[in-house]
Amino acid sequence: MTELENINPLANKVSTLIGVAQGYVAKTVNKGMVLLYWNIGKTIQEEVVKYDRAEYGERLVKNLGEQLTITYGRGYGYRNLLRMLSFYRDFQDTEIVTTLLSQLSWSHILEILKQKEPIKREFYITMCSNEGWSVRELSGRIDSMLFERTVISKKPEDTIYNDLKKLRDEKEMSVDLFLKDPYMLDFLGLNETYNEADLEATILVELQQFILEFGSDFAFMARQKRITIDEEDYYIDLLFYHRKLKRLVVIELKLGKFKPEHKSQLELYLRWLDKYEKQEGENTPIGLLLCSEKSDKMIELLELDKSGIHVATYLTELPPLALFQQKLQQSVIEAQKRLNTQASTKQ
């Protein structure tokens, strides 16, 4: 073997070493930088609290920013110092700070700091760490109001915090953290006239984006899966597997409004999968029925949750942002009111 023939394998080995080292160095630098910013915020806060006057604190940060900019550049100017101060004030829990240091960049943290409600901040920290979102993906999830669309947002706060802690500590995801309503399918680019087959086909073409909406632990298994009962064939629209839930997920697509008969169809599929497809160690399959409209009252009367069925709407076009936000926030408020009413009734 000539010297030149030895170069490529050697170059590959050295490139691998460099790549690993660069990744390690980047993570170490990011961790050190985020910790530095948190400590700067802490130091400023400890100085500010010595005085009661808010105007003094503002003047103190401005003067400090001017001095640090001369020595260290604009990264330590007034606006960034305010961000560091906000970082410390919002994240004084050392357990959460440790998670932030190890898994999220400063750019991720700046996006999360925009969330003023502690429960939303913890939701996005946990989900971002679990899903491995880029800063752009995190921003997109926030803009699409992922928290408000997730079923868990309509549960009591204790339940939300407990489910997030379980995902963070034990890597176990609850069904309520997985399910959403509505689902955003605007990336499919469907025209005004499409049928269920078009919807299925486009989902498969845009599978990467579809899985981003459903979560990185979502794995595609089959389209139009055939099952046979009493010599009659039935076809499941889409079949997925969720690794953290450890269960099969059936997705049925309906163009129109949810109808009661959809329940029996999906129940049949779920019972068949539970009997013939579920592997040892897996949990019972669940069904997700996506439709264009639904009646919450009808769904409540049918007690679909007892059958492992979740009905959600999907949007193939983004509505006006203000209206979308208003509707989602109102749905969360109404769910919380129902929970409070149920709790007072039991007392």
Image: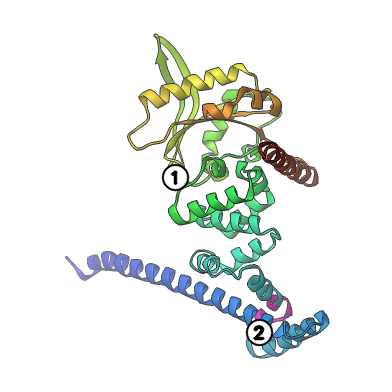
Residue 178 appears in which quarter of the rendering? top right
Q: Is residue 333 above or below residue 5?
A: above
Q: Residues within 10 Å of mark 2 (few under 14, many from 20)?
A: few
Q: Label 2 amino acid?
A: Gly
Can residue 295 be spotted in the picture? no
Q: Give the image location of residue 309, x and y in percent.
A: 55, 29
Q: Is residue 165 left or right of residue 283?
A: right
Q: Give the image location of residue 104, x and y in percent.
A: 54, 64
- The secondary element bearing badge 2 is classed as loop
Q: Quadrant of the N terminus?
A: bottom left
Q: Give the image location of residue 317, x and y in percent.
A: 71, 37
Labelled pair 2, 1 in contact (Cβ < 8 Å): no
**Magenta span: chief secondary structure:** helix
Q: Nearer the viewer, residue 1 or 204?
A: 204
Q: Give the image location of residue 294, x and y in percent.
A: 69, 27
Name the residue tied to disc 2: 73
Identify the residue at image location x=43%, y=68%: 23
Which numbered mark, 2 or 1, is in the foreground of this view?
A: 1
Can residue 170 be spotted in the picture? yes
* Dot label at residue 186: none
Q: Which stretch did the figure color magenta? A: 74-81
Q: Nearer the viewer, residue 340 or 199?
A: 340
Identify the residue at image location x=69%, y=51%: 143
Q: Nearer the viewer, residue 283 or 73?
A: 283
